[in-house]
Image (tube, grey):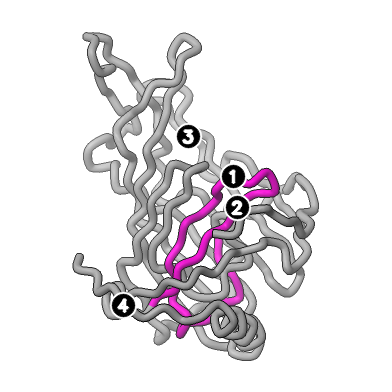
Amino acid sequence: MQLKIKTNKPNRISIIFLILILNIFCLSVSGQNIYATYSRKVKGLSVIEGKSISIPIIEYKLHVFVKKLKVYAYDEPLYLEKYPDGNMKYTIEGTNQQINHFLSIEPKQNLETIDFDSLIRRYFIHNPPPTFNGKTVPCEGRREYFKFIRPYQPWIFLDESKTIQGIECQHAKLYSSTNELICDAWFATSIPIPGFVLGLTDLPGLLVECFLPSLSTNLSLLSYTTELNIPDETFWPACFNGNFTFRSTLKPYTTKMTQ
């Protein structure tokens, strides 16, 4: 992929003004449907005898649907051709010790919806196979939900822009209240959205690229369209039919980081 880096840097006041306009525009333009797909690469860890061991990169295709003030996403595992039973076998680097790491074999994983009207985020995570060649029960897993108050996240919008795959992108970073990096992102200012999944609830434009260190995840946009008709039932998948456990209400916070 070739990136065209723009040399001009918009001043910070104009960026802040643009982001404010985008947030307002997101609420009014929310009738636009968006379907986007991403390459999601996760550098995983496995705990062996109390020690964290790096495992091979796990690859997914992330599917994201946006309709009005709702967003839905799920991961499509790309490892099933290589590990059809979900058993990732690998050898610990520098040793002859072979490890079995069990992955979910469900075709749709890590289901998540966010309703930016009710300000509720729900997700469902499948239980992994309990043993080698173990069977899983469809829609057996963990259902949880959060409430959040907007503006929840103090995104920092930097004086940097570049063109990625023909899309004009703005650089932004998100830090935690303890000043730890949550996300380093490039997003499309011309494609407003009500928010994003994976905990990026206050991102004002379509994500194009990002790194999420706490999730050991890299995301890169593969495709997007505004021409897809998205049925309302998309945002309540079958695995949501069950009891959800309330986790907490996420309140606005601040960070000392500025760039």
In which quadrant of the rendered view does residue 209 lie?
bottom left
Label 3, secondary structure: give it.
loop
Dot 1 or dot 3, earlier in sequence: 3
Question: Which residue shows up at 23% across the image and 42% down it?
Answer: 81
State the quadrant of the C terminus: bottom right
Q: What residue is disc 3 on?
A: 136
Distance between the alpha carbons at the discs numbered 4 and 2: 25 Å
Q: Main secondary structure of the magenta part?
A: strand
Q: Residues within 10 Å of mark 3 (few under 14, many from 20)?
A: some
Q: Judge whether residue 183 is colored magenta.
A: yes
Label 2, secondary structure: give it.
strand
In which quadrant of the rendered view does residue 3 lie?
bottom left
Q: What residue is disc 1 on?
A: 180
**Image disc number at residue 175:** 2
Q: Which of 169 and 115 lies nearest the eye of the viewer?
A: 169
**Relative to 159, residue 183 above or below:** above
Q: What residue is disc 4 on?
A: 6
Please say if the residues under marks 3 and 2 sit with CB atoms less than 8 Å apart.
Answer: no
Distance between the alpha carbons at the discs numbered 1 and 3: 36 Å
Q: Position of residue 26 (x, y in %)?
A: 61, 83
In which quadrant of the rendered view does residue 140 lie?
top right
